[in-house]
Image: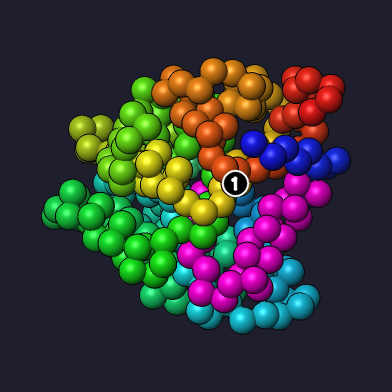
Amino acid sequence: MKLTIEPSEAAFDLAAAQRIVNQIKEKKNSVIGLSTGRTTGNMHRKVVQLHQEEPFDVSPATFFGVDEVVGVPREYAGACYTMLRTELADGLGISDEHLLMLPTQSDDYPAACRQFQAELQARGGIDLLILGLGENGHLGFNQPGTPFGSVTWISRMDETLDARIRRESGSAPDADLGGFTIGIRNIMMSRRVILAANGSNKTEIVHKALYGPVTTEVPASVLQLHPFAEAILDPDAAEKLPAEG
Ligand code: GLP
C-alpha cells in the first residue's frame, strides 16, 4: 500500500481533498465514494473551498456514501446523507441525482442493497473511495469479523456510535438501528482506494492495518492486497510506524 504522511492535520485534509478534485478533473463522470466522521469533515470542506477558489465542472460526477445509518430519518444530523450534504454536496451544488445514498429507512433493505450496487455499476463502477479508518479497524460499517466476500449489506454499528445516535436522535430504546454499508468485496473492486486516518487514537490501528497480518479481525488490513490503495495519514496517526515509513 502506498503511504503518504502529511506534516500537519491541515496538510492531511488538503492532500485528501486534492485526490478528490484531481479525480474529477481527470475523469469528469467519476464515481467517488465518501465516508463520514471526524476524519473526513474538514477534507470535504476543503474540496468545497478548492472548488470556490478555482471552479471546475462537478456536474457529471457521482458522489456516494459508503455507508449510512439505518433506522433514523435521513435529516437527522448524524445521518451520512445530511453530513455529506452539509459538508460537501451543498457547497458544490450537487443534486440528489448525483449524491447516491443508501436509504436510512426502507420497506425492503435487501432490495435497497441490490439497487444501490446496480446503480453504481450502471454509472461505471467505483473510481475512487475515501475510507475513514475506524478505531477497531472497520471500513464503512464492516466491523471486525466481516467476511472479505461481503457485498452491500446491513451490519451493526459499534456500541459507542449506536449509543450516540440513540442519544442524539431520540430513537426509542428498542428501535432497531444498524449500518448499511458497501461490503469488503465492493471496496476491493474499486479502482482506487484511499485509507484516511488522523489523530493519535488511530496510531495503533494504523500500524495493524498497514503492517499486521491480513485478517478479517482488522478489516482495513485487506487493503494491503489492493493494487491501488494509498494510506494518507497525519503525523499523530503515523506516530507508531517504522521510521523508514
Ligand atoms: C464510522 C463510519 C465510517 C467512518 C469511521 C471512522 O463509524 N461508519 O464511515 O469512516 O467510522 O470514523 P471517525 O472518522 O469519526 O473516526
Amino acid marked by disc 1:
Phe
Residue range in magenta is 11-37
| Residue 165 within the magenta-colored segment of the rendering | no
Residue pictured at 20% horizontal, 32% vertical = 174
Looking at the image, residue 74 sits to the left or right of residue 190; the answer is: left
Q: Position of residue 169 (x, y in %)?
A: 37, 45
Q: Is residue 35 magenta?
A: yes
In this view, the residue farthest toward the left is 107
**Residue under pointer 1:** 228
Q: Position of residue 4 (x, y in %)?
A: 75, 41
The quadrant holding residue 223 is: top right
177 in relation to 79, above or below: above
Instruction: Characterize the local packing of mark 1: few (<14), some (14-19) or many (20 or more) Cα atoms within 10 angstroms.
Output: some
Residue 139 position, x and y percent, is: 47, 37
Task: Give the number of callouts.
Answer: 1
Question: Residue 203 falls in which quadrant of the image?
Answer: top right
| Mark 1: C-beta under 8 Å from nearest atom of ligand 1 | no
Q: Is residue 59 visible?
A: yes
Q: Residue at x 78, y 20 (%)?
A: 242
x and y percentages locating residue 184 in the rendered image:
40, 39
**Residue occupying image coordinates x 45% and y 43%:** 188
Decide if residue 36 is on the left or right side of residue 103: right
Q: Is residue 210 left or right of residue 162?
A: right
Residue name at image x 64 percent, y 71 percent: 26
Task: Identify the element where label 1 is drawn.
Answer: loop
194 or 43, nearer to the observer: 194
Q: Nearer the viewer, residue 70 or 20?
A: 20
Q: Quadrant of the C terminus?
A: top right
